[in-house]
Amino acid sequence: MNSKDGTKSMNVLKVIGGKRLQGSVDITGSKNAALAILSAVLLADGVTTLYNVPDVSDIHIKLRLLSRFGATYEWREGALIIDTRNLHTAEVEEELVRPIRTSFYILGSLLARLGKTQLPAPGGCNIGARPVDLHIKGLRILGAEIDLTGGIYYAEAPNLQGGEIYLDFPSAGATQHLMATAALTPGMTVIQNAAMEPEIVSLAAFLGAMGARIEGAGSSTITIQGMDRLTGCEFRVPADRLQAGTYLLAAAITEGDVTVRGVMPEHQTALLNKLREAGVDCSEGHDWVRVQMVGRPVGVQKIKTMPYPGFPTDIQQPMAALLAIADGNSTIEETIYEGRTGHVNELNRMGAKIMVQGGRVSHIDGVERLTGAHVVASDLRAGAALVLAGLAAEGETIIRNVHFIDRGYQNFEQTLTALGGDVERIPVTEFEQALS
Ligand code: UD1
């Protein structure tokens, strides 16, 4: 495994624009699916083998967290083997939970296994406030007693019992957290207004392989029959639909021709519809999608992020990079997060004309070309958007805060380079020396 350590992430990416991307990419395992599975794996009284786990920094941090609670793991020939037979409570430092929100989603699994646990509260992040109230309310319905004191959630559940949960909002994380906890909670649990993301479906399949009985995952009502014990299993993490979307947009923005392989085209419907509206030629087979582009895209109105199957919030930032060079105006409305516009100022530094209204709506006045600049990634997908913009821009773009990109894209620069892009990781010290 090419583990993403802190030093590597202290680098910058240098992108020389103007190269057309061409070829095909095998999409690696989904970060979000794998993170949800790595919360639920603690439910297993056994040894689990996971295939296709992406080599990204969020996964490595999560594994460190699991090991603090007694899980042991090793990588063997690309597979991740986790032994969760001997768990115990632990006091973990904030740094392991704060930066990665899904760290908090192990609370329910630990409660179901141990009856008692404690975890620091997750922090907000650069895309806005991210409360966990739906998680807490749902766990309380299952019988958990939870108190927040001094930034730590203390949870006890001497008698977990299935219940009826209605989510005020179809939160992906709360659905995953509560579905997993209910799988090892006696009695029947029904989750209404559940999120319908493909990562919910893959988590239910994983829990099923552990011996859980779950119906309705992928719809808005999920029914879980709790079991007394779940066992280890073998499971393959599905391909990352958000990474696939990013490479499709990279093809479109460079007037390229790229096929992403190993993906389910039906997970890309919202994106492909909008790409076609923008004049991008898209074709698909049973496990691949191809994008071919000639000339500039045209502006697209009414892109609005919504819970799945709506337009994914994770794709709106890379989409903004494409529409920045469109012929005509576009609008993108972010409805999921209040602060997911950190890419806008940086794209504007590159010559884009984007105005954000009310923190949520990006009005994009398409320009003929972007020019390379020094820019800073504010979060994972903002980073991806800036790399895409750099691929299309004239000249050299330098992107700082690469550690955000490393959270979710495995071998990003190598993959883009293999497709014909010019993207290089430079040690930040070397870069700063060159500047002085
Ligand atoms: C997951 C994905 C993320 C994606 C998001 C929406 C992972 C690791 N991350 O995040 O990439 O952008 O789904 O598809 O899988 N909310 C509350 N209270 C809660 C929980 C959520 O108000 O208890 C709000 C959040 O602040 C946010 C919205 O609900 O505004 C969506 O959050 P949620 O669907 O839970 O996203 P995550 O699971 O955190």
Image (tube, helix red, strand yellow):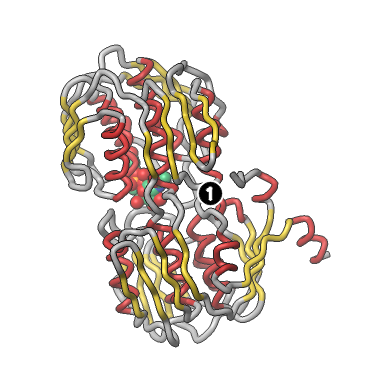
At x 16%, y 33%, the residue is 190
Q: Give coordinates of residue 138: x percent, y percent.
A: 26, 31
Pointer 1 residue? 407
Total numbered circles: 1
At x 25%, y 22%, the residue is 185
Residue 413 or 22: which is nearer the viewer?
22
Image vertical order of residue 90 relative to residue 244, above or below: above
Image vertical order of residue 48 relative to residue 235, above or below: above
Give the secondary structure at mark 1: loop
Disc 1 crowd, CA 10 A, few/some/many (<14, 14-19, 20+): many
Residue 42 or 206: which is nearer the viewer?
206
Q: Give coordinates of residue 311: x percent, y percent.
A: 31, 62
- Residue 114 seen in the figure: yes
Q: Quadrant of the N terminus?
A: top right
Drawn side of residue 210 relative to residue 68, left or right:
left
At x 31%, y 44%, the residue is 202
Drawn side of residue 361 relative to residue 160, left or right:
right
Q: Disc 1 residue type? A: Arg
- Residue at the top extreme, as displayed: 158
